Image: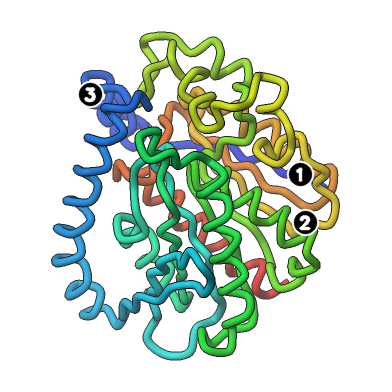
Amino acid sequence: MTLSTHVVDFPPAQQAAVRRINAVLARAPRLRTDPWRIEAGQRLSQWLDAASGAVTVPRLRKHGVTVEIRQTDGETPVPLRILRPEGPPRAVVLDIHGGGWFLGSAGLNDRMNAHLARHGFCVVSVDYRLLSERRGVYIDAAIADCLAAAHWTVTNVDDLGAATVFLTGESAGGHLAALTALALRDQGLIDMVKGCVFAYGVFDLSGTEGVRSAGPETLLFDGPTMQADLARLAPDRDEEALRRPDVSPLYADLEGLPPALFLVGEYDPLFEDSLLMATRWGEASDADLIRVPEAPHGFLHFGGPAARGARAAVRHWLNRHLKS
């Protein structure tokens, strides 16, 4: 039970590339979760999902990766996007996308998931219900959908072609992946999960000190509204209730969980979430923390050396734990 921390050391040219990406983000609009932005953002996300699917599916096929759409059973079926590698998979990766709980989709994660599929992993990505105050959809719906997807995955490993499962999530998906891992443990199903990967996850919905002190210079997010934006996920809860482990995994009992990899940029206002969660995880199991200097939240999507290095680090970590 250990925590191993690695700080990425970029050569000067690569660090300059990271700074150029940050300069672009500094001029970009910030993300917020007030109702009109949620609805507008979801319409844009749906359009991007449809447009990217027309491009990525043929491209994936050229690399031997096929796309299959399935859904879970039950009264509220959850759509699943499965990227299958060429040949028998080495393991199954259950992926939970990010997007602040109100944006994103399984299809928009194709670029990152295809990287794993091309290296022999079968990736099951979850299209969980997104936050919508107008429709009365809050965090409990997303949590339920991710757990349904996890149950489907661990009970369909024969069909998926590999008995070993990894659980991954980024940003909001990191939050949902951690809660899913805890639920699988509590239901006696965690033995099939070989490890978890969390990229710049959110683990305290009440807001860590890094979230509370985020200022207007914060990249990607509207810093001064971040704590209020998190509270929108469960509007029936006060600050104390937002710290309960059923929605904030930082405060959960972490015993009995598999090893985990945490990746986070040091310019991320959610940096403290990963640091605290990795520390606690390392007290109960093995944990690795990769800190990326000057990288913002969401860096996996912005290209450049941080994204390329992170994809390779995740792949190497999965390979290492497949052999252990």
Q: Position of residue 2 (x, y in %)?
A: 81, 47
For image coordinates 56% across by 77% down, the residue present is: 91
Q: Is residue 109 above or below residue 238?
A: below
Q: Amino acid at mark 3?
A: Ala
Q: Compared to 211, does 43 lie above or below?
A: below
Judge the density around disc 3: few (<14), some (14-19), many (≥20) Cα neighbours within 10 Å. few
Residue pointed to by mark 1: 281
Residue kind at label 2, given as amino acid type: Leu
Quarter assignment of residue 128: bottom left
Q: Residue at x 23, y 51 (%)?
A: 46
Secondary structure category for the residue under label 3: loop
In terms of depth relative to the viewer, which is nearer, 189 or 170? Answer: 189
Disc 3 or 1, which lies upstream in sequence? Answer: 3
Q: Residue 257, labelled with which disc?
A: 2
Q: Quadrant of the C terminus?
A: bottom right
Q: Are marks 3 and 1 in contact (CB under 8 Å)?
A: no
Q: Real-space Cα distance between discs 2 and 1?
A: 8 Å
Task: Look at the numbered discs 2 and 1 and tell me whether their residues touch, using CB distance below 8 Å.
Answer: yes
* Colouring used for the render: rainbow
